[in-house]
Amino acid sequence: MMNFVLFLRAMLRHATVLVTSSFLAAVVTEYEHVRGSSTTARAFLALTGMFLVAAAYRTWLEERQKVIALGADLAALRIELAAEQAKKPAEEAQARLLDAQREEIEVRRQAREVEEEHQKRMTFLTAPDSGIRLLVRHELAGKQSNRVFLAEEIASTLAVSQSEVEEALRILRSQGYANETSFHGRWLIQP
């Protein structure tokens, strides 16, 4: 019912404009003035009916134009929304890629730190004034003979892992300071 009332109000507004300020109304007024008498009731009712039909058409046209404008706005908003939604997966993918790259950088940094720490331990273990060679020098101090050292004995004395001691002993072997005996894990080491 409310829509019908709104339609009647809009139609009355258009009819008022047509009756009071249209060209046809001006012609009828001029005609009556020149002739000196009013138009017939039949002509007046026909003219009023034409004004009401024209007012109804203008009301419909006004609403139709609003619907078309709203439809265009809605289409533009849908396109904008689709563009935003299309950007979102790309932005999420880019964010995931950046996270993966950060994670890769962090893993490389940690691996580099581990490698540097390992290199420091190997340097400590193989240096002439520290690690294995210093231990051997102290063990052989004042003794004339060589002694066989066990890798696990060196590891426990220096508080490092046995695998690191074995790696350091291989480095010392390549430098000519150690030789593994025929018994695995037993080494002759020069100070």
Image (cartoon, grey):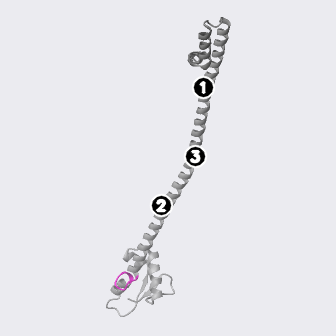
Viewer-nearest of discs 2 and 3: 3
- Residue under label 2: 102
Q: In the image, is 9 to the left or to the right of 164?
A: right
Which of disc 2 and disc 1 is earlier in sequence?
A: 1
Q: Quadrant of the C terminus?
A: bottom left
Residue 176 image position (x, y, % from top left): 45, 90
| Part of the protein shown in magenta | 126-132
Q: CA distance from mark 2 to mark 3?
A: 28 Å
Residue at (63% x, 25% y) in the render: 61
Which residue is nearer to you in this view: 148 or 8? 8
Within-10-Å neighbours for mark 3: few <14, some 14–19, many 20+: few
Residue at (56% x, 43% y) in the render: 80
Indicate the amino acid at tag 3. Answer: Ala
Would you say residue 10 is visible in this rendering?
no
Which of disc 3 and disc 2 is earlier in sequence?
A: 3
Q: CA distance from mark 1 to mark 2?
A: 59 Å
Which residue is nearer to you in this view: 178 or 68? 68
Which of disc 1 and disc 3 is earlier in sequence?
A: 1
- Residue under label 1: 62
Position of residue 46 relative to residue 70, above or below, is above
Residue at (37% x, 81% y) in the render: 131
Q: CA distance from mark 3 to mark 1?
A: 32 Å
Indicate the amino acid at tag 2. Answer: Arg
Say which mark, if any, is on residue 83: 3
Indicate the amino acid at tag 1. Answer: Glu
Looking at the rendered structure, the secondary structure element under dot 3 is: helix
